[in-house]
Image (tube, coloured by chain):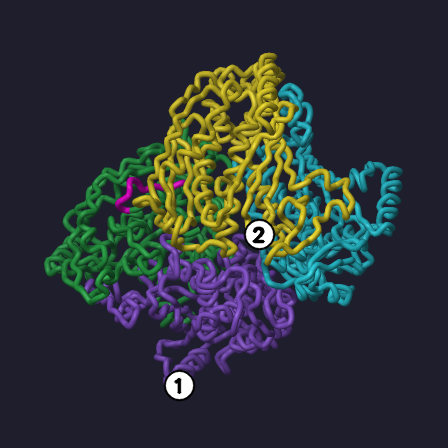
Chain colours: A yellow, B cyan, C purple, D green
Amino acid sequence: MSNTFGQTFRVTTFGESHGPAMGAVIDGCPAGLPLSPEDIRRELARDVPEPEIGTTRREPNEPEVLSGVYEGRTLGTPILILIRNVDVNSGDYLDRKNRPRPGHADLTWRLKYGHVDPRGGGRASGRECIARLAAGAVAKKLLALRDITVRSSVTELAGLPAGRPAELALAREEVKRIAGEGDSTGGTVTVTAEGVPAGLGRPVFGKLGARLGQALLSIGGVKALEFGAGRAHARMRGTESNDPIIREGREVRPSTNRAGGMLGGISTGLPLVVRLSVKPTPSIRAEQETVDFESGESARVSTTGRFDLNIAPRVAVVAEAMTAIVLADALLEDGFLPPVRVEGEGA
Amino acid sequence: MSNTFGQTFRVTTFGESHGPAMGAVIDGCPAGLPLSPEDIRRELARDVPEPEIGTTRREPNEPEVLSGVYEGRTLGTPILILIRNVDVNSGDYLDRKNRPRPGHADLTWRLKYGHVDPRGGGRASGRECIARLAAGAVAKKLLALRDITVRSSVTELAGLPAGRPAELALAREEVKRIAGEGDSTGGTVTVTAEGVPAGLGRPVFGKLGARLGQALLSIGGVKALEFGAGRAHARMRGTESNDPIIREGREVRPSTNRAGGMLGGISTGLPLVVRLSVKPTPSIRAEQETVDFESGESARVSTTGRFDLNIAPRVAVVAEAMTAIVLADALLEDGFLPPVRVEGEGA
Amino acid sequence: MSNTFGQTFRVTTFGESHGPAMGAVIDGCPAGLPLSPEDIRRELARDVPEPEIGTTRREPNEPEVLSGVYEGRTLGTPILILIRNVDVNSGDYLDRKNRPRPGHADLTWRLKYGHVDPRGGGRASGRECIARLAAGAVAKKLLALRDITVRSSVTELAGLPAGRPAELALAREEVKRIAGEGDSTGGTVTVTAEGVPAGLGRPVFGKLGARLGQALLSIGGVKALEFGAGRAHARMRGTESNDPIIREGREVRPSTNRAGGMLGGISTGLPLVVRLSVKPTPSIRAEQETVDFESGESARVSTTGRFDLNIAPRVAVVAEAMTAIVLADALLEDGFLPPVRVEGEGA
Amino acid sequence: MSNTFGQTFRVTTFGESHGPAMGAVIDGCPAGLPLSPEDIRRELARDVPEPEIGTTRREPNEPEVLSGVYEGRTLGTPILILIRNVDVNSGDYLDRKNRPRPGHADLTWRLKYGHVDPRGGGRASGRECIARLAAGAVAKKLLALRDITVRSSVTELAGLPAGRPAELALAREEVKRIAGEGDSTGGTVTVTAEGVPAGLGRPVFGKLGARLGQALLSIGGVKALEFGAGRAHARMRGTESNDPIIREGREVRPSTNRAGGMLGGISTGLPLVVRLSVKPTPSIRAEQETVDFESGESARVSTTGRFDLNIAPRVAVVAEAMTAIVLADALLEDGFLPPVRVEGEGA
């Protein structure tokens, strides 16, 4: 199950960072949904690395839709989206094949599988996420049928606020400055989903928060997750933490949103708000202490390949896609969308 | 799937807070595991509410093992553990049936299912967790075969440190003081698993952290989750965040544990460390703003039934059980334990 | 997953034949469905062994509904139905503990688990099916919302036709006559589902026939399964096998039903028709050749406990329940029934 | 779940008959398994249509392995196998777009999805099975590690025995003779798995027979399935049906195999034997009665495209692949193969 996510809208991803291709199969998408290559291309394009602070690997990310769509609409059959790896340059990796990078999955993959993909990263690479973006593009088309929008942003970068353009510019300078010292930085990502109807999610293990938890903590580099006011709840009083309930027109809903849009794992009708803490890129140019698996001796390793100086901007985009996938899955499961075929305007 | 957790060691829970019984069916436990009622009773006993700050509901929590065990050993068939609800007093709840409590699942359950269980809480009650403790008891017996131990503690309570006995005593006083004002408090829980072998967990969606995320964020009241240094990673540099890799005897492993025992979703061999932020009990005696579903008008609600003044101590125990369940599931899935029958000492 | 069936309407069964209790947890049943103990009792009562040819074990089969139902309606939470084993008499089994009966699961359970449940049969007993009847009772209540009925009958017994009352009387005599010789007999069971809407089922692995196949071949003693004209199709020509398509009022459907109600795994709107071949009860009084696991020597075994002379009548009832469960699952999955709550008359 | 099969060795297939490509993603295959394009090519080549009686569509069936394999060994990551559709000629189908063929899924797909894939067949096409062969090729490599072999053959064709070469030649003539009359024929397929260790399979819903049932009844055109002596069991006596148990060297096993290699859903160590009844190809040149969906009137339809005169030979090959997949899944689940990586000779 390791590479499949979802119960009803089921996404299976595949592909190694330096293999021939990445991609996703989406099973459970109803028939009749408009879906064009452009819909997918637009989402994939958001993974273009940030200028200066992202990796210098450049992928065209041209999606091939090889099944499940005919004349611009889904057939109700599995949708295969394939994205070729073009800008592959494994040479950088081969020389450090036996020296796992601290903070990276190199070590644990070797301990588990008896190998690392010597071409670099394998499935434990930021590149893996391109498949999630492809599936997220399909999920977003479903969400659009219910006027639900998901957005993400980097709200803190390298310890500096990054929510506004001017702040972001300063923070980017800080990322570059620290990278100039051979080091890396982390950040904070906020994801918001608006238009989510009240009543979405299932009790106990199917709570919306639990499913978002699995989805978002499966993204590499995410070390913490908070809903709504998050960690601050632990120091609040009940009267500060509880959102009062009011009537607004025909709807009964909380008047504030410290809960982050969920109560008991079920949506309240207010926006879902999730915040993620992203660790610094483990790949850095500074030398770090490691062990050489060939010699068995202590060694030093320095990353010379291409990598992001800060992965928070890429995590933001993937977190948005995963949130869309969780919502599409829950909407179908809970009957907010028809399971077999969608019809009418927009569909 | 809402009430089932796990792929290989599968736990399905059932029961409403004020219905006749709670319980769990565990499917996928190998044959031959020693399991006595006392093993289960001991774990259930840990849910005894904290003196003074816990609910005054008193349940004997006597487990009935009605299938899957014969002469003190598991049969490899589903294990049903049933726990009767004895101290049920629904009267308190009936009068507020139409007035959802702010911060509680009352509102969302009504919006979703068109009803709330008027007896109080239903599945969205702390009482639901007793079934998880029962399943956790079985999981812990499996973990013991690999010398893995899971522990939890309340490390902060009502905004005060609570890690040491003297601190805890002060913090409890603070909980009571604020409860005396009709209000409630939250806290922080830390779960640690020691002895976890390196190489546990699967890539991508099957990451150990993703599964722990789903498991722990499915516990009522948990608003944030952090692994290892958690949120602090976002402001670290790579050289501060990365754990150096060293050789220790025949093992290669990180020398520090800022990662919290996982890299790329796979265990490193160091302890797993997870921290949870628990919100204040939403049930408080102070009056709060709500809407009366019968009249459709704004109303006030005050909780008069029995409830915990602070739920962090109970969350800690359940988080420990869920962590044990995640580990048992992963150990079986990854071949660290035999899937059909266990043998030898301890087994 | 071994003890769970279904994707959306999920049934998990538990219990050993001579343990304290049998039962089922049903997860995924929408809220608002009327369900009384009498609804369940009525289905369980159908497992009363045939006079003279069934086992002499007599179970009251009184169901306890311990969760998921309140004031006669489902809550949308897991439904636990418990049935105590009362007429347990394990003594008969203990003396043949080490001598597996030919044709019975005794042998394979021992080879797999290193034990047999010495109390008799464990999960590989006809008794296991009582839990399926309980779940089938809930499924049938859902089917009633769509006016779908499932029926089963024994159409051949001991090699004689048994479809009509007079035939059945003769066939029963034959069963008894052969049992008098210490031997046993088999039979044929036909299950029919009427009112199934066209369009139910999913392509490829989710075909209605594939799901019925798993469900019905999971019943002990079933050695063959046929849909519609079944095996006879292999010797037909296309013009004989294909059902012509006609228009009837507003519906387009086949005019004959050699296909048994499905094309490409999706229902046509005509009745589903499945036929099962049931082997003779492996337990017989005549001595059979076996091996004694204690001595390791060849041995003889004769069954002296209580058992059915012919299990076809009990298989029929269980096959009906399993068909109802498959249909309830598919109806929910395909949107023919609402996933969260049902409303209105009958619901 | 409709396009995914298996719990541990999980196969997801995709592709429409006249779309750009077919294929499969295999998740859960351990690392270290030798797997070459030739291994897959060899299995795909077995789908080459029978001369004269198969379809005239000619596909090169060249597999592209786009993930999960590096330098001839599996990585433990998802294996994507892609097979392009080359000889696509949809024109034949477009003119009968609104006239569903009797006996074909045309009708039910239209009723369910509101469309048929006008290019012909979509997922309800024999072409769909090429993806299963690709996955079966991987499964067979795993089976080889345990010296398990799966074989299939057409044992009856057009009502004539076909087990021996001379018989097969005659039967083929009969198929062609009847095709000359514009009609089609069916047949019988037998699948045998040798070397299956005793103790494979799980009780109740995870019975080996139940899983084979789902797997084999998911193949288009299969209308009946029998294990071992199959339907004949219904008319046997217990003494005729039961296989005596003997000791052979260190193994205790049945001396005959009327059970078809399973007791209580668990393998006995004898060969698994399954027989399938395959209906005549629904596509025939003779005119058949149908309804035109555009006009709503009765109409006639005659199949003029390319199709198999008899599908039994192709069903045999797919049934073999599905049996291999079921066994690979069960072997991994039950610990007969290591879940994470295989090592040593052959692996």
Evaluate whether label 2 is on the same chain as label 1: no
Looking at this view, is D111 or A107 the one in front? D111
Give, as a three-letter code, the residue at label 2: Gly
Residue D16 image point, x, y percent? 30, 46
Give, as a three-letter code, the residue at label 1: Pro
Write the start and end of the magenta stretch as one range. Answer: D17-25
Q: Would you say residue A214 sits in the magenta stretch?
A: no
Residue located farthest toward the front when viewing the structure as drawn: A249
Instruction: Give the residue number, with chain letter if any, for mark 2.
Output: A201
Which residue is painted at 33% across and 44% down in the image?
A: A72
Please give the label number shown on residue C165. 1
Judge from the rendering whether residue B179 lies leftward or rightward of residue D146; answer left or right. Answer: right
Judge from the rendering whether residue B95 lies leftward or rightward of residue C84; answer left or right. Answer: right
- Do labels 2 and 1 touch, CB within 8 Å? no
Q: Secondary structure at mark 2?
A: loop
Residue A248 image point, x, y percent? 62, 54
Residue D149 image point, x, y percent? 36, 45
